[in-house]
Image: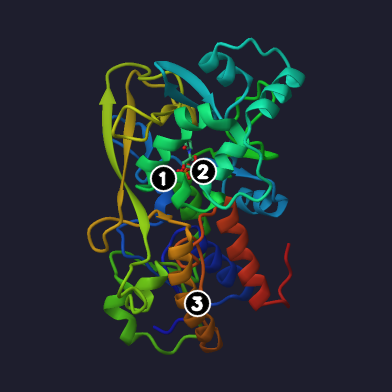
Amino acid sequence: MNYDIIIVGSGISGAVIAQSYAEKLNKKVLIIEKRDHIGGNCYDFYDDAGILVSKYGAHLFHTNYEKVWKYVHKFSDFSKYEHKVLAKVDGKLVPVPVNITTVNMLLGTNIKDEKEMDKWLLENQIKNDDPKNGQEAALSRVGKVLYEKIFKNYTKKQWDKYPEELDASVLNRIPVRNNFDGRYFSDKYQGQPKEGYTKLFEKMLSHSNITVRLNTDFFDIRDTLNSYERLFYTGPIDQFFDFKHSVKDKLEYRSIRFEFETYDKKHFQKNSVINYPNEEKFTRIVEYKYFTGQTSPKTTISKEYSVDYLPGVNDPYYPVPNPKNNEIFTKYQNEARQLEKNCIHFVGRLANYKYFNMDEAFKNALDLFYSLNPEVDKS
Ligand code: UDP
């Protein structure tokens, strides 16, 4: 059978492109997916204890983009869920991002309001309007003491690099609060798909024009694919080009190893996510029940260990933004741009080598679709 649109990967970007071409332009779409399931790293499933867990780590939806919020609601209802994170530091569980409680608990201060917190910040922040790396970014937000307690070692564990070896953007993901707001994100819209992410993806891909071929590696069949209108690739960009610019230094990605454990008790820990910046080998423990509000006498957690990505061995999760990787990526990006005239497009976190959130992945894929098809009604 002939397809108009070929998509490599069924994560957010692939699913948005597929859904849009199928529904808006009545195109026949083929998705090629290496894994045995759809949904990319958002994939969730019910484990042996009957708990809905995410195979590839916690996914929390939050956005300020009204159009993205509207788009995801076409495929699922969302429960109200505002994410909070605690970090275990000096034997105490403190809020992250840093807020008044964090400072009071870790430094024994007695800050009572925004005015006093602003004063504390002013005295402690190492101000920098143009931080050149993650260390400068974090120091300019929280100052030296909290940087060392919460950010320095966590970052080393997470990236196998110290903050000064990473772009400022990585640490700039975490704000600092001058109040008691303990939410991880401050976006206008926050919530979780009521029946989970996999169900949301199933709905997105349920159009009769869409065929998904699971357990199929694009690189095994790419030579057989020729008569299509457009091809969208969402995998790692270096692999598409057979790693040709990675001879001396490879383009780095980080991967995660998960250790799942089920316990015969209602809860394992007092919050959905607890970060371990310092002592443990894992970066965080996630207890999934908190995201869904599921009731059960059992609970499942996963410990996340950050590891190098090794092609063929594990999966890439995070690009590693720093000057060296950005330079290698630019070489691939220049080649990718050349291929646009052949109707081959690179979309998503891995193909764009950008550390963006789920909502940005939805937005970028929607924007790409509408920029390629400006005649289509955007509603
Ligand atoms: N980070 C940290 N300590 C924390 C939380 C975050 O040092 O307790 C740093 C770390 O470098 C991390 C980055 O901030 O990679 C971004 O954190 P985020 O929670 O956005 O990471 P993700 O959820 O994408 O893994």
Q: Name the quadrant of the C terminus.
A: bottom right
> Disc 1 or disc 3, which is closer to the eye?
1
> Disc 3 or disc 2, which is closer to the eye?
2
Q: Are marks 1 and 2 in contact (CB under 8 Å)?
A: yes
Residue at position x 64%, y 10% in the image: 110
Query: Of helix, strand and loop, which one carries label 3?
Result: loop
| Residue at the spot of label 1 | 162
| Residue at the spot of label 3 | 28
Query: Of helix, strand and loop, which one carries label 1?
Result: loop
State which tag comes first along the sequence, 1 or 3. 3
Q: Report the side of 111 relative to 155 (left or right).
A: right
Q: Disc 3 to disc 2, how far (Cα)? A: 48 Å
* Any part of residue 336 in sight: yes
Q: Are marks 3 and 2 in contact (CB under 8 Å)?
A: no
- Under 8 Å from ligand 1: the CB of mark 1? no
Looking at the rendered structure, the kind of residue marked 3 is: Lys
